[in-house]
Image: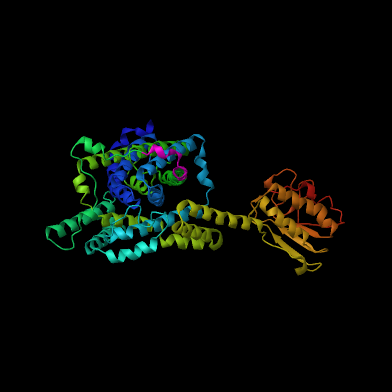
Amino acid sequence: MKNFTTKYVKSDIKSGLVVFLVALPLCLGIALASGAPLFSGIISGVVAGIVVGALSGSQLSVSGPAAGLTAIVLAAIASLGSFEAFLLAGFLAGIIQITLGFVKAGVLSNYLPSNVIEGMLAAIGIIIILSQLPHAVGFDEMHEGDYFFINADGQHQIFVTLANTINYIHPGALLVVLASLTVLIAFKKVPFLMRLKSIPGALIAVLVGIAINETLKATGSSLVISQEHLVNLPIPESMNQFWNQFSMPDFSQIVNIDVWVVALTIAAVASIETLLCIEAADKMDPLKRYTNTNRELKAQGVGNMLSCLIGGIPVTSVIVRTSANVNSGGRTKIAAISHGFFLMIAVLAIPSLLNKIPLASLAAVLLVVGYKLASPRIFIHMWHNSKKFQFIPFLVTVVAIVFTDLLVGVGIGLAVSVYFILRGNLKLAYFFKKDKHTKGETIQMELAQEVSFLNKAAIKQTFAHLPENSKVVLDASATVYIDYDVLQLIKDFVNEGAAERNITVELIGFRREYNIENSITYVNSIVSDNGAPVSPTVVTNGTKIPSNVLKVQELAMV
């Protein structure tokens, strides 16, 4: 229990307070963006802080309702027909996550292409921005089964909704969102405010929104934002009314296949987002501790089961809260747990103040979150990283998610990414067509950095197209790995195939340290039988290899 040493308690509680100030507007805002009751965001924040914080193996990670799940929640509530049916899907997702933890699936995230993950996050950012634009200008009315971008039939209507938004612009809401955005940007750009790390910009932005609207109300201005455009948490007059705010899953939907599809989707995305955040948290940890990812999946599963059982939305480990925790001096899980208690106290003690928050202020906070996820710099980075193997799968994933849904979009992105991976592996650095080469010509073949079994067919075809009586320089100088089957193919060609067609083969860069049994290798020179190095040599059909040249059969490639 050394992580709970008393020397960190003071800094952890202070950090927990900062994380609470960051989390409060995000819990409400993410619930709003998800089309869920605002109180459900508070429930999930409390459960994630106290329960997941206590069970998690991570000392720094802070969980809560995640922006990455808003698209799924938004679509699922509409498609399943009720919030209670969605709660059942979230409850089942928790069971699936616990199962994943027991089968040690925590390593699976390492095998997802980074370009697809980046595309998923960027698409989520775009969806958050699009979903918050109506709230930002005061268009908060939703008809039954119409959660902004998805209609009652589950079909997207993004541009229709945005077009309608123009007709419902509220000047007061526009004033609040611009003021809130100004505050948020100032906390990122103004040096003095940037040094105030203990005061979160999101909280100040929300307070500014409240102050502006209360001033408009006090002066009788026509710009005042009415109650339907403010946070509307129930204010219980008794404990009985307080308990009535909680919802239960509709277990009668347990046989509904759509519920299980949503559950699997939530479990997959929540687990991936959690594992990515845990990896980031471990990298930020000043004490350089390592988190058991399988234990983390179990903790998240328990958290999601409990959250959805009492009316909360699904949770994940969240990078925004986690980074705020680290930057504020948090060192143990006391910070995450205390932030959950602060959230619970706030909803019990100051619900009247919370109900003064304009939805436009929360929209401003989420617009900034969305922009961070979908920043133009990410697109530029992916473009410069690799236009073909990184940017195209990344962009396809973004477009597919925005115009279909998250699960389908990620599937399309994975398919495109795998296509380019296979295409790249099937290519050789030098490809031959027999009619383009003449007899006696010297042909240079440079092997790629990694040569896997996927390259075998291309290399074999290349050998088959080499013209007779030619000279081939086979260069492996840039290669760090060559598959055993490929090594055997090269060995067979040098010993037999080249000999039959009188092809001269020169081996360059085959390194001894590959140390693969019965394969061909060589560094920058060929060594003799007694170990003495000699100059690079040519192995020619019909020519007896002298004793001072290492026989092909004895070469080993690294």
Q: Does the magenta stretch include residue 260?
A: yes
Decide if residue 321 is on the left or right side of residue 509. left
State whether residue 284 is above or below residue 501.
Answer: above
Q: Which residue is drawn at 50% across and 59% down?
A: 396
| Extent of the magenta region | 249-261
State left or right for residue 352 relative to residue 498. Answer: left
Q: Does the magenta run of residues contain 92?
A: no
| x and y, in percent, of residue 314 in the image | 38, 43
438 shown above or below 266: below
Question: Which residue is outermost to the left?
Answer: 219
Taking the view exactly as shown, the residue that stands out farthest to the top is: 1
Task: Judge whether residue 58 can be spotted in this image.
Answer: no
Q: Is residue 397 left or right of residue 152?
A: right
Q: Does residue 516 show up?
A: yes
Residue at 20% over, 57% down: 226
Instruction: Measuring from the top left, give residue 487's x and y in whole percent.
Output: 72, 50
Q: Which residue is drawn at 48% across and 58% down?
A: 400
Nearest the viewer among 197 and 385 is 385
Q: In x, y percent, where is residue 278? A: 43, 43
Q: Quadrant of the N terminus?
A: top left
- The dominant secondary structure in magenta is helix
- Residue 234: image quadrant is top left
Q: Which residue is found at the position 12% from the left and 61% from the top?
A: 220
Colour scheme in use? rainbow
In this rendered view, identify the residue nearer to me: 19 or 134.
Answer: 134
Q: Nearer the viewer, residue 119 or 268?
A: 268
